[in-house]
Image (cartoon, helix red, strand yellow):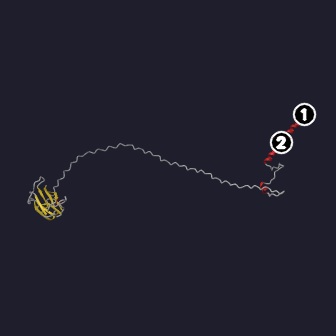
């Protein structure tokens, strides 16, 4: 009898525990969703706006307090987030690889064959060309004087001996023009002296030529070499030329 009573208490305990668990579960569901079907006291479905817009009625002579209207708040402007721009990466340039130039191998030069020297006979010395004229012209100087004339001496050799009876020509051109002759040794001073007076009382500027000539008038000295250019410059001028001195030397 006692055992049956204890079994009944245990069954009752289990039932109570199950009911408690179910009650807790129902309360949890109602807490999460008050509109659940098992909630016998569901809250009214009227929203906040309907209550706020309801028009109050006067009752008992007093007015409802004014409804608070929320003020609009400034919506913050979104701030631009700086975007990171990647820096371009430099592409490495190719480097020219130096090429190795092979060093030329020095080669030994081939020996040059030695030429045999052949004895060549020397040519004969050139034949001496005889001078064209037998007399050499030597222009000594030209200086100032009271008259215009050309004088000089004829030498028989370079040793210095005088030679007389030699015709000395004077012309206005080399070997031509108006020609005048005098004979050496006939005009004083020495046996080889000669003189051609162009102007006995003053200057006679011009070009004059003297040379040695034979009896037929053929030049025996170079007429161009005996050129004398006279002028009318004063005695203080070192370039004055009134008195020309021209000698002739027999070769």
Mark number, residue 235:
none
Q: Residue 237, located in which quarter of the rendered image?
A: bottom left
**Residue 148 appears in the rendering:** no
At 10% from the left and 62% from the top, the residue drawn is 182
At 85% from the left and 40% from the top, the residue drawn is 16
Taking the image as shown, residue 4 lies to the left or right of residue 68, namely right
Taking the image as shown, residue 88 lies to the left or right of residue 11, namely left
Q: Nearer the viewer, residue 146 or 108?
A: 146
Mark number, residue 20:
2
Q: Secondary structure at mark 1?
A: helix
**Residue 27 appears in the rendering:** yes
Taking the image as shown, residue 46 lies to the left or right of residue 183, namely right
At 83% from the left and 42% from the top, the residue drawn is 20
Question: Percent position (x, y) of residue 61?
Answer: 83, 57
* Mark 2 closeness class: few <14, some 14–19, many ≥20 residues within 10 Å: few
Q: Residue 18, located in which quarter of the rendered image?
A: top right
At 81% from the left and 45% from the top, the residue drawn is 27
**Mark 2 against mark 1, which lies toward the viewer?**
2
Image position of 114 with respect to 175: above or below: above
Question: Percent position (x, y) of residue 100?
Answer: 44, 45
Q: Secondary structure at mark 2?
A: helix
Quarter the N terminus occupies: top right
Q: Which residue is mark 1?
A: 2
Q: Nearer the viewer, residue 133 or 120?
A: 133
């Amino acid at each position: 009898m006692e055992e049956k009573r204890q079994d009944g208490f245990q069954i009752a305990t289990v039932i109570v525990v199950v009911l408690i668990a179910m009650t807790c579960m129902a309360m949890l569901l109602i807490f999460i969703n008050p509109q659940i079907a098992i909630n016998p006291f569901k809250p009214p479905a009227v929203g906040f706006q309907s209550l706020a817009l309801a028009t109050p009625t006067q009752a008992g002579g007093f007015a409802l307090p004014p409804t608070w209207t929320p003020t609009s708040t400034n919506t913050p402007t979104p701030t631009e987030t700086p975007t990171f721009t990647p820096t371009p990466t430099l592409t490495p340039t190719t480097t020219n690889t130096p090429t190795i130039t092979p060093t030329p191998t020095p080669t030994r030069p081939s020996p040059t064959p030695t030429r045999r020297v052949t004895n060549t006979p020397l040519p004969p010395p050139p034949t001496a060309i005889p001078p064209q004229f037998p007399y050499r012209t030597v222009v000594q100087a030209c200086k100032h004087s009271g008259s215009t004339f050309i004088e000089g001496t004829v030498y028989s050799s370079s040793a210095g001996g005088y030679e007389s009876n030699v015709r000395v020509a004077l012309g206005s051109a080399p070997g031509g023009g108006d020609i005048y002759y005098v004979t050496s040794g006939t005009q004083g001073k020495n046996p080889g002296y000669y003189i051609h007076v162009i102007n006995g009382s003053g200057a006679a500027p011009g070009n004059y030529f003297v040379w040695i000539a034979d009896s037929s008038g053929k030049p025996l000295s170079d007429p161009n070499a005996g050129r004398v250019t006279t002028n009318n410059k004063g005695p203080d001028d070192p370039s004055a030329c009134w008195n020309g001195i021209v000698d002739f030397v027999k070769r």
